[in-house]
Amino acid sequence: MRAFYFFCALAGGALFFLQFLLGLFGHGDGHDVDGHVDAHAGGDVGHETSMLTGILTLRAMVAGLTVFGLTGLITLTSTMHVGLGLLISIGAAFVSMMIVAALMRSMSSLYSEGTVRVENAVGRPGTVYLGIPARGNGVGKVTLTLQNRTVEYQAVTAGEALPIGTRINVTKVIGADTVEVVGAMKQEKVA
């Protein structure tokens, strides 16, 4: 039994170390089985993870194997019955798998897509970066803060011309990189 526990601890530890090294070099992401992935027509992708597939990831199984082997070796050094030591080792492995699964789930909730969506620009204030001709007779450019980023879009206006530095508000999205704007109520210039 000692050789079996030792093999489990050694194999689990080696796989854990390999995962650690791969993670250091950027190759450790996305290799676990995460359950079901839904893709929708709008381009959104959702991840659904059942409790079982959350526990049965490669990382969780490696942790479980390592803890199983180490706990088994520890129980063999005591005066405990071999069967009880096996049950304790299995329990410790299951608990470690649950902990790793919970940690991985909490870390995956930190994920952020990062795509700036132009639809979110409507109603946002900004500044004219390149003068905008009057009544849709040409295109200028505006900068605005959108989703914690400074972005630049082509812009048109239905009103009077808007010179460089004019404060604006986005009223409509015209295209993937073009918005319609109006001058803000308070026409101030930006240095």
Image (tube, rainbow, N blue to C red):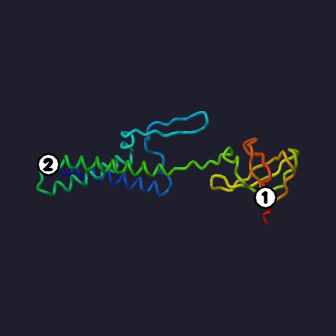
The residue positioned farthest toward the top in the image shown: 41
The x, y position of residue 155, in whole percent, is 79, 48
Q: Residue at x 55, y 35 (%)?
A: 39
Q: Residue at x 82, y 47 (%)?
A: 157
Q: Disc 1 or 2, which lies upstream in sequence?
A: 2
Of residue 35 and residue 183, the one placed in the foreground of this image is 183
The residue to which callout 2 is attached is 82
The x, y position of residue 71, in whole percent, is 23, 54
The residue positioned farthest toward the bottom in the image shown: 191
The residue to which callout 1 is attached is 186
Q: CA distance from mark 1 to mark 2?
A: 81 Å
Q: Quadrant of the C terminus?
A: bottom right
Image-based side of 148 in relation to 37, left or right: right
**Which circle, 1 or 2, is nearer the viewer?**
1
Residue 27, numbered circle: none
Image-based side of 127 in relation to 3, left or right: right
Q: Residue at x 83, y 58 (%)?
A: 164
Circle 1 packing at 10 Å, graded few (<14), some (14-19), many (20+), is: few
Name which residue type carries label 1: Lys
**Please, what secondary structure does the residue beneath circle 1 have?**
loop
Name which residue type carries label 2: Val
Q: Quadrant of residue 184?
A: bottom right
